[in-house]
């Protein structure tokens, strides 16, 4: 069985859980408690030298970095697909996912926020303002792209979840955590609600994980 080393609140972990669930793949959930710095332990860094989550283990193969892991899943387990069949459509879905994965998430992840708090002395209000700045910048662009797509259905692309939804939903979760006003983004909110009705997304939600802790 696949082994998923992850943390319930981690956006990248959330993303990979959704992908695994959509692929209908069973996996052993192995919690890596970021708050207790389990990701920095010698044992975990022997598995993933970056000390980041998630890490997916398949027998002797150790996979890191969610874009690479999800590509591997798509190649290894092509049904159901997370990408549409046409090359232009695949490029659009990948671009929507990259907008979140490359331009929003990296500057709001735990490492950055810990630096803001511990090194620069930012309080919670300042950290929330930082996160909101970059989430809003990304969501404004994403909302505009979704709004002009006449073929868009219930999800980011069409009427079945794709890679774009896999990336979007954890970012919406993060936006709510950092008290971002989502009212300017009706298309994003509608897509998040459509995803929330699916068991694959429900099972992957942070609050439903075995290591879930109260979220302040």
Image: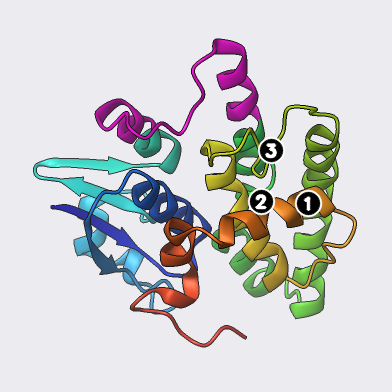
Q: How many other residues sit within 10 Å of disc 1, few (<14), some (14-19) or many (≥20)? A: some
Q: Is residue 109 visible?
A: no
Disc marking residue 134: 1
Which residue matches tag 3?
A: 153
Residue furthest toward the left? 60
Q: Are marks 3 and 1 in contact (CB under 8 Å)?
A: no
Q: Let me know if residue 13 appears in the view.
A: yes
The residue singled out by tag 2 in the image is 107
Whether pointer 2 and pointer 1 mark residues with C-beta atoms closer than 8 Å, the reply is: yes
Q: Give above or below for 83 relative to 175.
A: above
* 76 relative position to 135: left or right: left
- In the rendered image, the vertical position of residue 110 relative to residue 107, given as above or below: below
| Nearest the eye: 2 or 108 | 2
Q: Residues within 10 Å of mark 2 (few under 14, many from 20)?
A: some
Mark 2 or mark 1: whose residue is earlier in sequence: 2
Q: Specify whether residue 114 is painted magenta.
A: no
Location of residue 61 by image quarter: top left
SS for callout 1: helix
């Amino acid at each position: 069985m696949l082994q998923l080393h992850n943390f319930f609140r981690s956006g990248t972990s959330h993303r990979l859980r959704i992908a695994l669930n959509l692929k209908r793949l069973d996996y052993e959930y192995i919690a890596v408690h970021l708050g207790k710095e389990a990701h920095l332990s010698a044992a975990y860094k022997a598995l993933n030298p970056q000390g980041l989550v998630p890490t997916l283990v398949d027998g002797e193969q150790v996979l890191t970095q969610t874009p690479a892991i999800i590509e591997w899943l798509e190649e290894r387990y092509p049904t159901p697909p997370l990408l549409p069949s046409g090359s232009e459509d695949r490029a659009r879905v990948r671009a929507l996912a990259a907008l979140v994965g490359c331009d929003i998430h990296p500057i709001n992840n735990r490492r950055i926020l810990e630096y803001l708090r511990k090194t620069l002395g930012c309080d919670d209000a300042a950290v929330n303002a930082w996160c909101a700045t970059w989430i809003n910048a990304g969501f404004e662009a994403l909302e505009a792209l979704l709004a002009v797509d006449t073929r868009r259905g219930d999800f980011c692309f069409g009427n079945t979840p794709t890679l774009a939804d896999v990336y979007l939903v954890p970012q919406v979760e993060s936006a709510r955590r950092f008290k971002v006003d989502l009212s300017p983004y009706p298309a994003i909110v509608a897509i998040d609600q459509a995803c929330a009705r699916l068991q694959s997304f429900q099972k992957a939600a942070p609050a439903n994980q075995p290591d879930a802790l109260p979220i302040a």
